[in-house]
Image (spheres, grey):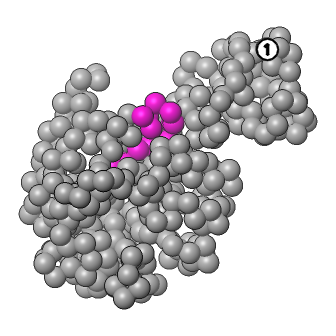
Amino acid sequence: MIAILRKSASDEAVKHLVSWIEGKGLQAHVSHGENEIVIGLVGETEKIDPFLLESMDIVERVQRVSEPFKKANRKFHPEDTVVDCGHGIKIGGGHFQVIAGPCSVEGKNLIDIARRVKAAGATMLRGGAFKPRTSPYAYQGMGASGLDCLREAADELDMPIVTEIMDPRDVQLFLDKRIDVMQIGARNAQNFPLLKEVGKTDVPVLLKRGMSGTVDELLMAAEYIMSEGNDNVILCERGIRTFETRTRNTFDLNAVPVLHYLSHLPVVADPSHATGYRRYVEPMALAACAAGADGLEIEVHDCPERAWSDGAQSLTPEQFEQTMDRIRAIRAVIVSNHE
């Protein structure tokens, strides 16, 4: 249930209403938009008579919310959420960012890759120190030492780090290493203990859609994080598993406008994992921009043929530079059309 308040509602009146709602055993989440104030009621809303609530002087109208996700719902929070990723980088609400770097942190070559992607226009550095792999015999990542490599590169270049966390027991390690954005990968999109644990922090979370997950399941995963108090969630469409075998996954670009319609959270698209092939990454990155994505996550490696993982879908720095030129061209058209 949501209560849309009158523009004339004073801070004191809003505070009194929130206290009244909480006294009924519900949570009240206040969102201040440009044109209205919205209070989202979460919990056993049947305890409150909507007609009684609507009769209050400061309440314009009351609306029931049928979707099971509440905190991630745009009805609760009409304005776009802007997530501060650190280092002066924000995403959402008109702020567009490109996250780039290797699939896996491999050591000394990371800093050179980082320098080159930043020079090309990337604003955030990605790289996997912990790698969830289908085979137990595949490369699993450098672990904590890989986080150190990321931290060193990020500090030199003043870029936020985006790296995957797989285990709730590693949350404190990520906090100690000052990781700017914790990524929840597709395989852990319904790892509920992990979602809850990162939700207890205030570190931004890049949440990827599960490989067979619906849009609603992605939003409910975000709800797990937000229900613990962390509202800094970035949604990521990275392709879903279908019957098609010509690409690694099927890039569901429908999800970008759908997520924007349903939720206030920023939406990022990952054309690298979606397609699985270098030759398709650029066209799908451009398509994601045109669809309204708030950012892109793109894999870049200085020598993809020797990459320890996912070399087939990694752009070279030169290819990434060309792709960034085209991304800027698409973004210029989108921005000018909205002015």
Q: How many marks?
A: 1
Residue 134, horizontal then vertical, whole percent: 39, 76
Q: Residue furthest front?
A: 243
Q: Which residue is depicted at the point 22% across and 26% down?
A: 336
Q: Nearer the viewer, residue 152 or 182?
A: 182
Which of the 4 image quadrants contains residue 301?
Answer: bottom left
Which of the 4 image quadrants contains residue 104?
Answer: bottom left
Residue 267, horizontal then vertical, whole percent: 41, 44
In this orientation, does residue 170 appear?
yes
Look at the picture and state if 53 lies above or below 231.
above
Q: Which residue is depicted at the point 69% across and 20% down?
A: 63
Look at the picture and state if 232 lies above or below 139.
above
Q: Nearer the viewer, residue 85 or 289?
A: 289
Q: Which residue is depicted at the point 44% across and 61% down?
A: 186
User: Which residue corresponds to mark 1?
Assistant: 54
Q: Does residue 280 appear to the left or right of 338 in the view shown?
A: left
Q: Which residues are magenta?
A: 258-270
Residue 254, horizontal then vertical, whole percent: 34, 37
Look at the picture and state if 231 lies above or below 41.
below
Q: Quadrant of the C terminus?
A: top left
Residue 102, horizontal then vertical, whole percent: 26, 71
In this orientation, does residue 88 appear?
no
Q: Which residue is depicted at the point 38% across and 50% down?
A: 237
Q: Quadrant of the N terminus?
A: top right
Q: Residue furthest right?
A: 23
Q: Does residue 156 appear to the left or right of 67 in the view shown?
A: left
Q: Does residue 28 appear to the left or right of 37 in the view shown?
A: right
Please name the amino acid that badge 1 sits on.
Glu
Is residue 327 in the magenta section? no
Q: Nearer the viewer, residue 74 or 201?
A: 74
